[in-house]
Amino acid sequence: MDNIVLIGFMGCGKTTVGIRLSYALQRSFLDTDRQIEREQGKEIAQIFAEEGEAAFRGLETEMIAKMAEKERGRIISTGGGLPVKQENRVLLKKLGTVVYLKTTPETVYERVKDDTKRPLLQCGEPLRRIRELMAERESAYMAAADVVVSTDGKEPAEIVEEIEERIK
Ligand code: S3P
């Protein structure tokens, strides 16, 4: 059975929706960031601070390559920057059915504004940064996606139902 892979910007709901989807479909849930943290014994913010973003991106590619080899039938949520690399988009296709949770910069900002665990948004003007990054990444998300689900104004339960419907 194929994995179902959730992609999208930070704060788009990949983890919340992924966990609910895993209950609904009785499949186990995995998250690329949490797996990287477990293997490295460090939080993402610490990896960025000590080793830099490029090192983190390398770990992401290794993680998704490994998952594409061994995981089946799971719900997998991914870091917001993962689809940016072409190499990773190829691996995402191999990993399973890719669902892009599409949201707006304003919604993301509301969700992440008090969060200190996302190193890319620890800056003076986070909303502006979110707008820029999202615009830069949109084509990568679209290229990686098999299914696009818009999440704005929807409850997680609704999003889960929509995903179930769309991947049948
Ligand atoms: C990142 C998103 C984060 C995490 C890292 C970088 C990004 O994951 O991988 O902080 O580049 O958008 P979430 O999307 O789960 O926040």
Image (cartoon, grey):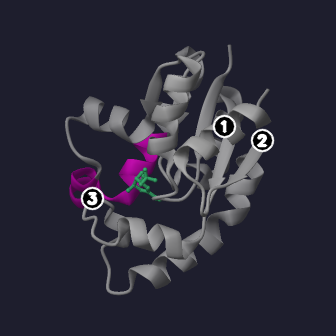
Residue corresponding to mark 2? 146
- Does residue 27 appear anywhere in the picture? yes
Is disc 2 placed on a helix, strand or loop? loop
In the image, taking residue 129 as reference, residue 34 lies left or right, namely: left
Foreground mark, 2 or 1? 1
Which quadrant of the frame does ligand 1 lie within?
A: bottom left
Span colored in magenta: 45-60
Front in this rendered view, residue 141 or 108: 108
Please identify the quadrant where the N terminus is shown: top right
Label drawn at residue 161: 1
N-terminal of the two: label 2 or label 3?
Answer: 3
Q: Does the magenta stretch include residue 130?
A: no
Rounded to the nearest whole Å, what is the CA distance between mark 2 and mark 3?
A: 29 Å
> What secondary structure characterizes most of the magenta part?
helix
Q: What's the amino acid at mark 2?
A: Asp
Q: What's the amino acid at mark 3?
A: Lys
Residue 3 spot, x, y in % from top left: 62, 24
Residue corresponding to mark 3? 117
Taking the spot 38% from the left edge, 49% from the top edge, the residue there is: 56
Taking the spot 41% from the left edge, 72% from the top edge, the residue there is: 110
Occupied quadrant, residue 133: bottom right
Is disc 1 placed on a helix, strand or loop? helix
Mark 3 nearby-residue class (10 Å; few <14, some 14–19, many ≥20): few
N-terminal of the two: label 2 or label 1?
Answer: 2
- Does residue 66 appear anywhere in the picture? no
Front in this rendered view, residue 159 or 122: 159
Residue 75 spot, x, y in % from top left: 54, 28
Front in this rendered view, residue 25 or 12: 25
